[in-house]
Amino acid sequence: MKLLFSPNFTRASKRLLKKSPKLSRSLQETLKTLESNIFHPILKTHKLEGKLEGHWACSINYDLRIVFKVVQIENAEAILLLTIGTHDEVY
């Protein structure tokens, strides 16, 4: 599936990588895996509930998460990346 980057995701990822440049490779690998297989076991993809109902999350590492939504664009499904951050920041 195609990845779409929201302005919020772009800002949050730049801020994260500025604080922790070492995460760049992990983030790139996670995005590549997400694009090829949204439910790959390494991602631990799961549906969210409550105020984030209808959204999904996947893990980059023990504490970092990407929140996204599956959307229709040009008669195909795409992954809209909404935000990235620690567990406490995104939930």
Image: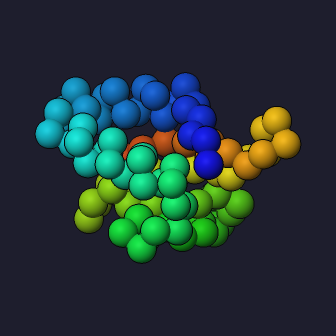
Colour setup of the view: rainbow
Q: Is residue 91 visible?
A: no
Task: Give the image location of residue 3, x and y in percent.
Answer: 57, 40
Q: Residue at x 42, y 73 (%)?
A: 41
Instruction: Check the image and name the residue furthest to the front.
Output: 36
Instruction: Check the image and name the residue furthest to the bottom.
Output: 41
Q: Nearer the viewer, residue 21 or 29?
A: 29
Q: Is residue 32 above or below residue 12?
A: below
Q: Residue at x 33, y 42 (%)?
A: 28
Q: Is residue 75 visible?
A: yes
Q: Indicate the quadrant where residue 60 lies.
A: bottom left
Determine whether, in the image, residue 60 is placed left or right of residue 23. right
Q: Nearer the viewer, residue 77 or 88?
A: 77
Task: Give the image location of residue 34, x and y in percent.
Answer: 48, 54
Determine whether, in the image, residue 65 is placed left or right of residue 2. left
Q: Indicate the quadrant where residue 7 lies.
A: top right
Count of numbered circles in the view: 0
Task: Give the image location of residue 64, x and y in percent.
Answer: 32, 54
Task: Give the image location of residue 70, x and y in percent.
Answer: 68, 52
Q: Residue at x 78, y 45 (%)?
A: 76
Determine whether, in the image, residue 1 is placed left or right of residue 30. right
